[in-house]
Image (cartoon, rainbow, N blue to C red):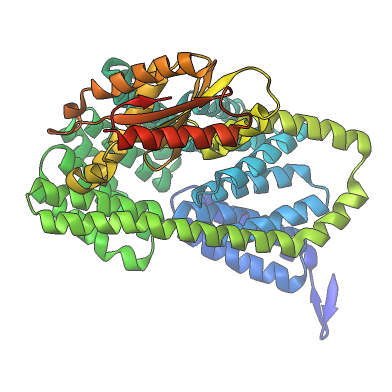
């Protein structure tokens, strides 16, 4: 007990009451009242900080990170959970640190920072494994699954999400089981969409049906536990899956149930309801009905919401106007959709800068703590395990999400390896002919579908020893084993496959060809020099009429 101004303060009773209130906030967050949970946890945090109860403050910061994720305030959550991570690490509480780092990784991913998210998620799983805490393992494993899902690797996402659900079931945690089942269903739906894009309708149908089954299981648990937040997500996801399967009436029935659960919802949630409803109407050809909810969603944009909500609203609005033959407003909506991507790129840069500031401010504090706590043997063992897990996840940031091919970052890493290799190889530079006119005449959405199809063709035509990379925009690079003569034959097959592709299935009147330049180790020694010669040959192919290979 402490005495202030002749009054006796029972610090133990205060701490017990605060912990009870924090549990109440968690219950609110698990029953769809996330805004109330955030408010209550914020009040507890302010009181704990005033009393100097740093541990309770760290618990508040950890939970607040999750509530911020639920309502779409990722940057605010990032500030709180970063502070929690530092406290748990400094005070040697790896179990609590695992939870905080898992939330931190998820928030980073929400902000579109997958590389930073990988680091935190891997570290969280390492800590959870060391403490043998199945609940922390369940959370961290789920976040890793989400990272794979984000990076268009649904097979790996499914494996990790299945494991997270198993762990939640093993400890009887219904809330975690419900949340992770939602993500497992989402990973299956992603696999279904990819299968459909690859012209595998039967497999796509099976995966979407499985996604519906898993989401229905999650909805049953959400109903049982009274989790309106999870229930709304389930119903929105089910509506989307039904709509993709052509079951539009069932999709609309889900949205009616969704509407009944919108008490205590928030801007992001209301936006998601409205643009999902608009999407369903668009998919069923009811473009006039789609306009009302989408225009209502536009009116909510100034009140907040996420980047994903913003682009979804304008994407579906553009499609609705186009379906009605109102091309001027369709173009205006699509411009906003496109501008959002440009603005988002700048915002991501700013987010990385703010994240760097947070790291810099705590760097010295962390270094002191690490110096005092690290032991050589433990550090080495931990590093090895972390490296193994990082290697598994690192591939996720090497994939271009639109085409499914490797990206420029991967090419840079391969060039470092190729510099020391002695075996002959070739590099092909590919460019889609007249791609600007595709965007201008058919729309950027069609342009994206063309690039995705190019990725599909490359994966189908290349040898197992070859690797395709999206270099940027409509340009691709292919690393080919062997000398330029054999590489040129492979590229000719690629050129012909693109020319003969059924482009009219994407849009009537669409026809695509590519030009290719090839060079190899007989022409130069370094990968960059070979790439430069391939680029010169590509220029020659275009100058001589396009739709040809020059080596």
Q: Tell me, yes or no, if residue 217 can be seen here.
A: no
Determine whether, in the image, residue 56 is placed left or right of residue 424: right
Give above or below for 147 relative to 275.
above
Q: Residue at x 81, y 86 (%)?
A: 5
Give above or below for 485 relative to 65.
above
- Pick the front one: 412 or 290: 412
How many discs appear? 0
Determine whether, in the image, residue 223 is placed left or right of residue 511: right
- Residue 310: % across, % down: 33, 56
Determine the residue located farthest toward the left in the rendered image: 325
- Residue 281: % across, % down: 16, 43
Quarter of the figure with the N terminus: bottom right
Q: Residue at x 12, y 58 (%)?
A: 328
- Residue 490: % across, % down: 41, 16
Specify the quadrant of the image occupied by residue 429: top left
Give above or below for 289 relative to 485.
below
Give above or below for 400 relative to 47.
above
Q: Residue at x 50, y 34 (%)?
A: 533
Determine whether, in the image, residue 545 is placed left or right of residue 90: left
Quarter of the figure with the C terminus: top left
- Pick the front one: 226 or 354: 354
- Residue 209: % across, % down: 31, 22
- Pick the front one: 425 or 395: 425
Q: Residue at x 8, y 54 (%)?
A: 326
Q: Tell me, yes or no, if residue 89 can be seen here.
A: yes
């Amino acid at each position: 007990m402490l005495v202030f101004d002749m009054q006796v303060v029972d610090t133990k009773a205060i701490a017990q009451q605060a912990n009870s209130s924090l549990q109440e906030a968690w219950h609110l967050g698990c029953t769809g009242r996330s805004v109330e949970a955030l408010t209550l946890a914020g009040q507890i945090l302010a009181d704990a900080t005033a009393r100097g109860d740093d541990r309770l403050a760290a618990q508040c910061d950890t939970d607040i990170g999750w509530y911020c994720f639920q309502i779409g305030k990722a940057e605010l959550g990032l500030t709180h959970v970063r502070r929690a991570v530092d406290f748990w690490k400094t005070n040697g509480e790896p179990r609590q640190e695992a939870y905080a780092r898992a939330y931190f990784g998820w928030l980073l991913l929400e902000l579109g920072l997958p590389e930073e998210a990988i680091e935190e998620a891997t570290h969280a799983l390492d800590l959870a494994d060391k403490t043998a805490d199945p609940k922390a393992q369940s959370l961290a494993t789920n976040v890793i699954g989400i990272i794979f899902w984000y990076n268009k690797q649904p097979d790996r996402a499914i494996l990790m999400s299945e494991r997270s659900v198993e762990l939640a079931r093993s400890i009887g945690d219904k809330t975690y089981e419900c949340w992770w089942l939602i993500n497992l269903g989402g990973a299956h739906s992603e696999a279904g969409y990819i299968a459909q894009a690859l012209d595998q309708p039967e497999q796509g149908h099976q995966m979407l049906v499985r996604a519906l089954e898993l989401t229905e299981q999650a909805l049953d648990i959400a109903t049982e536990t009274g989790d309106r937040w999870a229930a709304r997500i389930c119903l929105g996801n089910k509506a989307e899956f039904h709509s993709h399967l052509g079951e539009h009436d069932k999709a609309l029935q889900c949205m009616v149930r969704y509407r009944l659960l919108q008490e205590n919802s928030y801007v992001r949630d209301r936006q998601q309801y409205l643009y999902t409803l608009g999407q369903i109407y668009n998919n069923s050809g009811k473009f006039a009905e789609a306009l009302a909810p989408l225009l209502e969603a536009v009116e909510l944009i100034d009140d907040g919401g996420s980047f994903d909500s913003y682009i979804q609203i304008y994407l579906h609005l553009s499609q609705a106007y186009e379906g009605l033959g109102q091309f001027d407003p369709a173009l205006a909506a699509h411009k906003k959709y496109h501008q959002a991507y440009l603005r988002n790129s700048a915002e991501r840069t700013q987010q990385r800068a703010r994240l760097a500031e947070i790291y810099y401010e705590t760097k010295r504090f962390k270094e002191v703590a690490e110096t005092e706590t690290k032991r050589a043997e433990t550090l080495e063992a931990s590093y090895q395990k972390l490296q193994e897990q990082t290697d598994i996840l690192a591939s996720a940031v090497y994939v271009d999400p639109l085409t499914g091919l490797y990206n420029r970052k991967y090419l840079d890493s391969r060039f470092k390896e190729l510099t020391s290799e002695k075996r002959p190889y070739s590099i092909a530079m590919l460019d889609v002919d007249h791609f600007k006119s595709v965007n201008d005449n058919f729309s950027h959405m069609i342009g994206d579908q063309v690039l995705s199809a190019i990725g599909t063709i490359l994966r189908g035509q290349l040898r197992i020893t070859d690797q395709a990379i999206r270099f940027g925009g409509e340009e691709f690079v292919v690393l080919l084993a062997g000398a330029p003569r054999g590489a040129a034959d492979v590229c000719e097959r690629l050129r012909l496959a693109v020319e003969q592709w059924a482009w009219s299935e994407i849009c009537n009147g669409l026809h695509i060809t590519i030009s290719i330049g090839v060079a190899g180790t007989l022409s130069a020694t370094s990968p960059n020099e070979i790439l430069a010669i391939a680029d010169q040959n590509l220029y020659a192919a275009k100058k001589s009429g396009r739709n040809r290979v020059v080596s």
